Image: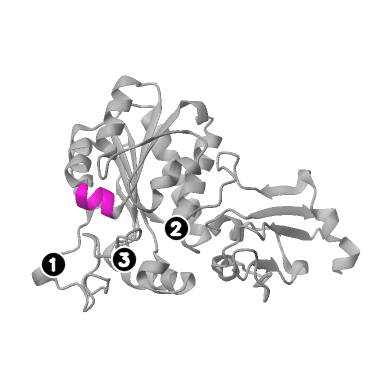
Amino acid sequence: MAEATGIKEIIKPENLVYKKTKLMTDNTLSYCPGCGHGTAHRILAEVIDEEGLQSQTIGVSPVGCSVLMYNYLDVDMQEAAHGRAPAVATAIKRLLPDKFVFTYQGDGDLAAIGTSETIHACNRGENILIIFINNGIYGMTGGQMAPTTLEGMKTSTSPYGRDVKTMGNPLKMTDIVATLPGTYYVTRQSVHTPANVRKTKKAIRKAVQYQKLDKGTCFVEIVSNCPSGWKMTPVQSNKWMEENMFPFYPLGDMKTPEE
Amino acid sequence: MAKIRGSIIVNVDKCKGCEVCMVSCPTGTISMAKEVNGKGYNYAFPANPELCIGCANCAMVCPDGVITVYKTKI
């Protein structure tokens, strides 16, 4: 039957359903195979493209795996010192209030060294979008324990598993900022299945639209995998994430604007 | 009855062989190649192209955005 219909008949420009957005450059991503960063980059680029904000967007990239994000997104980007992306984004948004400003940070950046910047930017209600990629580990530097590492989770600096007596409890950053009066929209999503990718895209689109209302900080956490840091294959790590990360970091909206 | 047929094109050079698309495909269209690409990864390819329904699930989850999807009614 394949011969009867012909693959060449299907592959025509008018039948196109999905193509990588033009806002993603043709550079090869530096991430490990199966890393959620690539998907998160792509859906953010798609939303910016579909909202027609390419020329009005200024992004702030963090220190971490996504430090080279400005090579992959075809929008204006600014690099910030480790953890200071919300502070830099605050300055950009206050000086250029017409621009769409977002930060993109990992858990080592946002929840460890940048805790105070994040909490104070959210508490001031700065009109920015913070995208927080949570994989429970310092991926770039070799899988060390991060504040978001789960109890009992093995990392290169906690080889017998995280012991809460000596190493403290995992930090739920999103729950903390949801309690602050400055935040407008706080949600936790993931990008490991097609359904979750679509939900996350919807959440990012909402956050982009809310920034035009000038109501406060939008905070989107994306629970992601780290196949290299967790020492698993990408498919195994997605399964492990569903079984272990989601019970502790449940997906869903933490704070939605009152309609 | 109109039947929906799809087709995918994988940018083989950029595929990192993570297999996330293979797991998310509802019809079992995608398999991993036995050969490797220039970077040494076993790339994804449509092994059973006649099964593809053009749902774009594989393209949605692909971290590297290497999959392009086409769909038509016949």
Dot 1: element: helix
Write down the residue under mark 2: A36
Q: Amino acid at mark 3?
A: Gly
Dot 2: element: helix
Dot 3: element: loop
Residue A230, magenta (yes or no): no
Give the residue drawn at x 21%, y 79%.
A160
The image's colour scheme reads one colour
Write down the residue under mark 1: A167
Q: Is residue B4 above or below residue A216?
A: below
x, y percent for residue A69: 44, 44
x, y percent for residue A10: 80, 54
Main SS, magenta residues: helix
Q: CA distance from mark 1 to mark 2?
A: 27 Å
The image shows a total of numbered marks equal to 3
Tell which subunit mark 2 falls on.
A
**Residue occupying the far left of the picture:** A165
Q: Amino acid at mark 1?
A: Met
x, y percent for residue A114: 22, 45
**Mark identifier at residue A143:** 3
Q: Quadrant of the N terminus of chain B?
A: bottom right
Q: Earlier in the sequence, mark 1 or mark 2?
A: 2
Q: Residues within 10 Å of mark 1 (few under 14, many from 20)?
A: few
Tell which subunit mark 1 falls on.
A
